[in-house]
């Protein structure tokens, strides 16, 4: 176990969680630069607030919740100022990118649940704990997201035929 605030702790946390947090932030912000800014801010908050964690799962849940909240704040702030967030990332149009775009087109409350369930392999129970929601709510959001995604994905498949 590393002591919070030490160089070893910082290196471990950054190495262990950077990619996960970047993926979550990117899904909401749709910009690599903005996602990187959000993740950097999460790590700064971790070091300045120095929260106490019961275990590694609690630490991970705190980081995920913090990056989700920061991403939402960034979106609200840019919308309020009428300033678009950086649109700097252009991805090739392969099936993965089309699937990612379809997920991003969902209402915001479904995006994180879908990402954590399908991309990060969390169970409904684990997602509920991370997002501090009832498990039934998470299950409902997943179900509704599937209903919304189905016609989008069917349309995409028709383009290939």
Image (cartoon, rainbow, N blue to C red):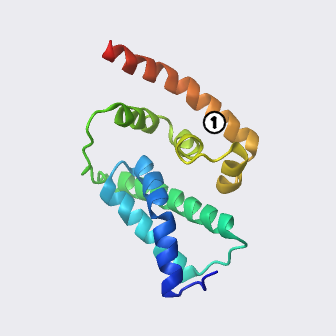
Q: Is residue 90 above or below residue 95?
A: below
Q: In which quadrant is the C terminus drawn?
A: top left
Residue 104's x, y, as percent?
43, 39
Residue at 33% in and 52% down: 31
Position of 25 compared to 141: left or right?
left
Q: Is residue 59 visible?
A: yes
Q: Nearer the viewer, residue 145 or 85?
A: 145
Q: Is residue 25 above or below residue 150?
A: below
Q: Is residue 73 visible?
A: no
Residue 13's x, y, as percent?
52, 72
How many discs appear?
1
Image-quadrant location for residue 3: bottom right
Image-quadrant location for residue 99: top left
Position of 23 compared to 127: left or right?
left
The residue indicated by pointer 1 is 141
Residue at 49% in and 79% down: 10
Q: Nearer the viewer, residue 129 or 10?
A: 10
Position of 95 compared to 67: left or right?
left
Mark 1: secondary structure:
helix
Residue at 64% in and 30% down: 143
Disc 1: CA contacts within 10 A as few (<14), some (14-19) or many (>=20): some
Residue 150's x, y, as percent?
51, 22
Residue at 44% in and 55% down: 25
Residue 125's x, y, as percent?
73, 47
Image-quadrant location for residue 159: top left
């Amino acid at each position: 176990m590393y002591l919070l605030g030490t160089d070893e702790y910082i290196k471990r946390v950054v190495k262990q969680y950077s990619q996960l947090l970047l993926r979550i932030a990117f899904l909401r912000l749709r910009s690599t630069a903005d996602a990187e800014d959000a993740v950097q801010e999460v790590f700064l908050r971790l070091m300045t607030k120095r929260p106490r964690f019961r275990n590694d799962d609690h630490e991970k849940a705190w980081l995920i919740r913090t990056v989700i909240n920061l991403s939402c704040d960034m979106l609200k702030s840019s919308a309020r100022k009428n300033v678009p967030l950086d649109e700097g990332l252009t991805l090739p149009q392969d099936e993965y990118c089309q699937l990612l775009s379809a997920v991003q087109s969902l209402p915001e409350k479904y995006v994180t649940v879908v990402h954590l369930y399908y991309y990060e392999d969390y169970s409904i129970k684990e997602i509920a704990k991370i997002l501090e929601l009832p498990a039934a709510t998470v299950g409902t959001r997943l179900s509704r997201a599937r209903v919304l995604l189905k016609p989008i994905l069917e349309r995409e498949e028709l383009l290939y035929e």
